[in-house]
Image (cartoon, helix red, strand yellow):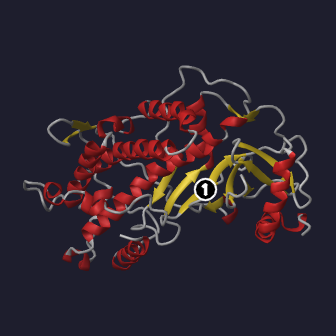
Amino acid sequence: MPASQIGQLILAIQERFPPVGRIPSPSSRAGSTSAEPLRIEIDEEFTFVVPPDWHRPLPPTEVQLDSDDLIELDGGDAVTIETEDEAGDRLPLSAAVGRHLPGSAPAVPPFDALAYYRPFHFYRGRWGIYLKASGILELVRRLVGRNFLYKGERWIVDFAAKSLLFHELFHYQTEVACSRLEYPLPTTLFGIDRYTTYFFDRAGSYVEEAVANSFTAANITEHYSKSTSSVRYGPVIMALLTAMDHQPEPYNKFRDFLGTIRLANGRDFLIDRMYEPWLLEKPRVSKILSSSLYYAELGRATHCPTYLVLDNKKIIYVAKPFPKERGLRVITHSRDHPPPHIHVEDVNRGVSTRYLWPDLRPYPGDEKLPRPMEERLKAYVERYRDQIAQRLHGIYGPLLTR
């Protein structure tokens, strides 16, 4: 199903069930909302008991943010950190520079406390995935076990952002799957949707969080295993899995859904919960149709709006790259600090530095490129000068002399 068709499905759902701009209150038709333990069976092998105090984490009812506090992310963007003075080999993640986290650190926050998803069933505008800058930094600290990064570890910031993105992306895919399920049902013509019922279903949301973490583990591993530098990613991927092990229940149940078959079993359970209480007889719907019918061709779903919430503006930036060419790439950072400058990545060496714009002198205190690379940089800038200048003008405005 191409992105255009998913977009049409979303618009059709919103026309049939007009969003009210908030999370609705649990209704009498919402399944499994009573505060009592629930015993659920995924298959013959796995049985869970949903604690009586478990309810789906809710996103903020209102996003009280100025437009300057939100950046919509494009597919090629990366999240990074930068400080004005990057002398030395350390990049602080918080005010407590260089302080190692204690070995007995508290439980890792659930990913839905570090990011969140606003469903299109409930929000017409600004629905989508929200990655909190503070949440990204918190996950980075958990991954490295300290309050700073070495400069060669800057990529871990984007790794953390992608980890949160994959978790929330599964929530989006599950809403799309439910939309595919509910749209053909004649009852929807009378305003009875299935997603609201499923959204408040304790059993469904409990398993969904565990499967979302499993989805994160599978996709982050696949994403970074394709890199030529995959060896350095292994320890950080293991740190991510360990962090998820130390999250509260049900997030830490993700290992029960690792692997293609177990992940499919988890999605099957979610589809069955979407049909309840209407279709309770056996065999269940998922055994006949399979959840792959509803989750098919969603992929990484770049058509899901994704925002960076700048609740920490000091060091978090969005890196917007220009094409790789001549062994290098120029990158600009959103809302970057003065003086006007560009970021230059030596692709072959994996080294990044900064150069002042427009005269292309090395940024004070930063590494100077070798002469051959500087010549390539000049040729690169000549080709993309207008595009680079236009983007920098949007960042620096009157500070920039074009």
Where does residue 155 sit, x and y in percent of width and height?
Answer: 63, 42
Instruction: Name which quarter of the figure residue 71 lies in.
Output: bottom right
Amino acid found under the numbered disc labelled 1: Leu
Rate crowding at label 1 as few (under 14), some (14 to 19) or many (20 or more) other CA atoms within 10 Å: many
Give the percent coordinates (x, y) of residue 162: 53, 48
As drawn, is 196 to the left or to the right of 65?
Answer: left
Q: At which x and y percent is residue 195?
A: 31, 63
* Vertical order, 163 against 169 (above or below): above
Could you tell me if residue 124 is visible in this image?
A: yes
- In the picture provided, is 62 more to the left or to the right than 174? right
Q: Quadrant of the N terminus?
A: bottom left
Residue at the image point whose x is 26% and y is 69% from the top = 182
Residue occupying image coordinates x 43% and y 75%? 4
Local secondary structure at mark 1: strand
Q: Is residue 155 left or right of residue 218?
A: right
Residue 213 falls in image quadrant: top left
Q: Is residue 322 above or below residue 212?
A: below
Residue extending furthest top? 103
Residue extending farthest to the front is: 372
Q: Position of residue 215 (x, y in %)?
A: 39, 46
Q: Quadrant of residue 144?
A: top right
- Side of 135 where 302 appears, left or right: left
Residue carrying label 1: 308
Determine if residue 93 is in view.
no
Kindly give the residue lying farthest to the left in the view shown: 282
Q: Nearer the viewer, residue 311 or 240?
A: 240
Location of residue 317 with respect to 71 vertically, above or below = above
**Which residue is depicted at the point 39% across and 73% down?**
10
Where is 325 relative to 240, above or below? below
Image quadrant for the C terminus? bottom right
